[in-house]
Image: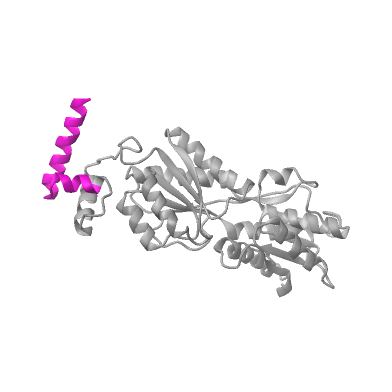
Amino acid sequence: MSHDVSTERVTLAELAAEAGVSLSTISKVLNGRPDVAAGTRAQVEQLLAERGYERRVGRNGNHTELIELVFHELQDVWSMELIAGVERVAQQHGLSVVLTESGTRHSPAPEWIEGVMRRRPVGVVLVFSDLAPSYRAQLEARSIPFVIVDPAGDPAPDVPSVGSANWSGGLQATRHLIELGHRRIAAITGPDDMMCSLARVDGYRTAMNAAGLPIDPGWIHYGDFHVDGGREHALALLRLPEPPTAVFAGSDLQALGVYEACRSLGLRIPEDLSVIGYDDLAVAQWVSPRLTTVHQPLRRMGAEAARIVINLARRRPSATPRIDLATHLVVRESTAVPA
């Protein structure tokens, strides 16, 4: 053990000499201390990268052996898929996962950054739009890497993120309904300030326009991705003088709300209304009829995010990782030709 420590000290001393800084400055950079000039920090970081110096994940006394997964809202089945993906990769690396609920969908609350500074995780996985520059600076000063999953907004170019092909998913869902013969197709998507909501409804519009079908502005509803919202929007659509024959719901939970609306109005799925969801949660196979939906690889998104923060902690990537995973349509029994 003493030989290993001595070797490491000599290596760091050589690095310090080469960078023209003190050994304590090298140590401060390695430990993420904020009291190092930005230019010096950059110079030392570059030298560490060039010499292939790897900071050990977790077991160096500087970080606790965990990955922090932060949601603005834990949404039961949807959140569990992301959690399962993060946990699988964390366990492979001997790390635990801590869950935090904080802030709005755009950013965690101010008190969160104080807590994460105390916890000193190996890395942070955030289910938000972006991260404020001040938060980013504090995480970087402590050498705590982060990645954003399913970003609600459009993160800055230098922010690592993992998402999915939302526009393509909306296009596939709507095209499936058009191919069945539907012409009056409504869309219930998520909040109008979330990129994934807008991208899914843009895919819907593209499919409708490509087929030469008119889009009634009253057919597009912005919801909240929850069951109750899906039910209320579906009731409004189904009470129109000319109701839609099909509904594309921007989440499986909203699709369940559409099921409830049909039940309360005495309508049958798919005989009276075709319904298609988004996410392909386990519940999509439990409902009757089983839900046709767009598979979003949530578990894999969580796994990729965990891999990214672990690799960032080890200073492996040479470029900012930006990943958009493919989506695909899963056809079940909730869609059929219109009556």
Residue sitting at x 61%, y 50%: 75
Can the viewer see residue 323?
no
Please give left or right for residue 192 compared with residue 315 in the image. right
Q: Answer yes or no: is residue 137 visible.
A: yes
Residue 20 in magenta stretch: yes
Q: In which image quadrant can residue 3 be found?
A: top left
Task: Name above or below for residue 283 compared with residue 199.
Answer: above
Viewer-closest of 242 and 238: 238
Whether 273 is drawn above or below 21: the answer is below
24 displayed left or right of 213: left
- Magenta segment includes 61: no
Q: Where residue 110 sits: x, y (%)?
A: 43, 59
Q: Residue 60 in the image: x percent, y percent? A: 30, 36
Horizontally, is 129 left or right of 279 in the view? left
The quarter of the image holding the C terminus is: bottom right
Image position, residue 51 (x, y; %): 21, 42
Residue at position x 83%, y 71% from top?
Answer: 242
Q: What range is drawn magenta here?
A: 1-29
**Quadrant of the frame with the N terminus:** top left
